[in-house]
Amino acid sequence: MAATLHRLRSWLGALVVAILLPLAGFSVATAAPAPPSADGEVGTQIVGGTRASTSTYPWVVYLATSSGFQYCGGTLVAANKVVTAAHCTVGDSASAVRVVAGRDDKNSTAGVVARVTKIWIHPSYVDATQGNDVSVLTLDRNLTQATLPIATSSDTGLYAAGTSSTILGWGTTSSGGSASRYLLKATVPLTSNATCSSAYGSDFKAAHMVCAAYPQGGTDTCQGDSGGPLVAGGKLIGITSWGEGCALAGYPGVYTRVSNFATLITQQINS
Ligand code: ARG
């Protein structure tokens, strides 16, 4: 857990540097990954993923600072509501957050940039490893992108070990590496609670979290993917939350178990 928090802090540190250096007049050369080949393969991406399009996944969005720096993901669950992770929004003022929809390539101007009028954070949130890592943003406008339904308490079947799930994001393509210029996706199987407990001990709280990974590692979300979707059965079943490193064998990615928070999220959607 200390290592995880350390990594989280290094990521936040990098974020602060990325924001402050340009303000100080330095230009930060963001190393963009090589463009994908014609078949969309890009080597090691999300970690171990391939390029995806917001035309296929219209509800996947990213959170950016007012200067356009992407730092987390999110999911459009109503025309003006985005589900993300609490650790992505904690301490932020709504006026500082931008939600970008319909933009596969961060270096383009495609899609729409919405402002945020309200940030709701789970009232019991402390840090990601303690659970409750869920936040709902209210946008200043209704987006036209299609929304994704959230898993509810009647969707326990979607959480069975081995269920094939989709992860999406613009985060780093290796632990401590640089963020992806393009939206990436990968498929990972959900693990059992027992598998995740044996990796993380008491940091894994089955009621609040669900894990996904291949036993051999190699495919995972990573820094900057947080807040983004874990999808199965056409529903939002998880929110990218934390993990030890990225894509390490024996250390699955940990996601907020959306079904456990469905009532609270729905209240926010309807508020
Ligand atoms: N905490 C990271 C973030 O803020 C997400 C980490 C996900 N890690 C993993 N191994 N799946 O972006």
Image (cartoon, helix red, strand yellow):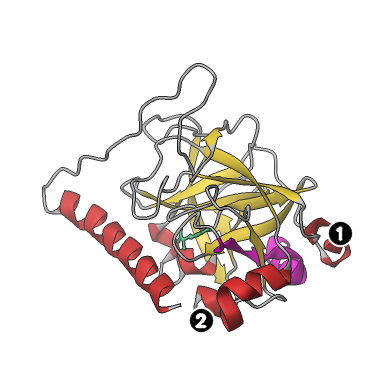
Considering the numbered disc 2 on the image, is that residue within a helix, a strand or a loop? Answer: loop
Give residue 20's quadrant in the image.
bottom left
- Give the magenta range: 250-271
Cβ atoms at labels 2 and 1 below 8 Å apart: no
Give me the C-alpha separation between circle 2 and circle 1. Answer: 29 Å
- Relative height, residue 114 to residue 102 (above, below): below
Residue 91, percent from left and from top: 41, 72
Q: Which mark is on residue 157?
A: 1
Q: Amino acid at mark 1?
A: Gly
Would residue 119 be counted in the magenta stretch? no
Q: Is residue 40 left or right of residue 21?
A: right
Q: Is residue 230 left or right of residue 151?
A: left
Would residue 270 be counted in the magenta stretch? yes
Q: Which residue is mark 2?
A: 126
Mark 2 within 8 Å of ligand 1, using the beta carbon:
no
Residue 239, percent from left and from top: 61, 59
Determine crowd level at label 1: few under 14, some 14-19, many 20+ residues with C-alpha closer than 10 A.
few
Residue 241, percent from left and from top: 54, 64
Q: Quadrant of the C terminus?
A: bottom right
As rendered, which of 134 and 180 lies closer to the eye?
180
Considering the numbered disc 1 on the image, is that residue within a helix, a strand or a loop? Answer: helix
